[in-house]
Image (tube, rainbow, N blue to C red):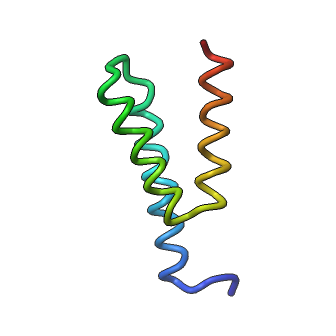
Amino acid sequence: MPGSLSQQRVTSNFWLGLAWLGRIAKSTTRHIQLLAWLGLAWLGRIYSDVAFLSFFLCLCIRALAA
C-alpha cells in the first residue's frame, strides 16, 4: 500500500480544506479573502511543498481570471 490510512485521511482533509479556502477566496469581500490567504499560508506550514505549489497555482488562476 502506498500510504497508511492516517496519511490518506490527512491528505484528503488537506485537499478538502484547500477547496474550501479556494471557494472563500472567490468572495468579493477583502476581509474574507485575507482570511483565506492566511489559511493557505497555515496549510503551507504543514504541507510545505504541496501547499506552496497550490498557492502559486491559485495565484495564476486568479491572474488569468482577472
Residue 50 locus on image (x, y percent): 64, 58
- The extreme top residue here reads 66
Q: In this view, does 8 lie above or below 3?
A: above
User: Which residue is at a point 38% across and 29% down the rendered structure image?
Assistant: 33
Residue nearest the observer in this picture, 12 or 21: 21
User: Which residue is at a point 53% across and 78% down the rendered structure image?
Assistant: 7
Residue 24 locus on image (x, y percent): 38, 33
Total labels: the figure holds 0
Quarter-wise, where is residue 3 in the image?
bottom right
Q: Is residue 65 above or below residue 17?
A: above
User: Which residue is at a point 44% across and 25% down the rendered structure image?
Assistant: 26
Residue nearest the observer in this picture, 9 or 48: 48
Residue 44 locus on image (x, y percent): 53, 56
User: Which residue is at a point 38% across and 23% down the rendered structure image?
Assistant: 27
Q: On the rendered image, what quadrant is the N terminus found in?
A: bottom right
Residue 40 locus on image (x, y percent): 47, 47
Quarter-wise, where is residue 47 in the image?
bottom right
Quarter-wise, where is residue 29 in the image?
top left
Q: On the rendered image, what quadrant is the C terminus found in?
A: top right
Using residue 45 as the reference point, say whether residue 29 is left or right of it.
Answer: left
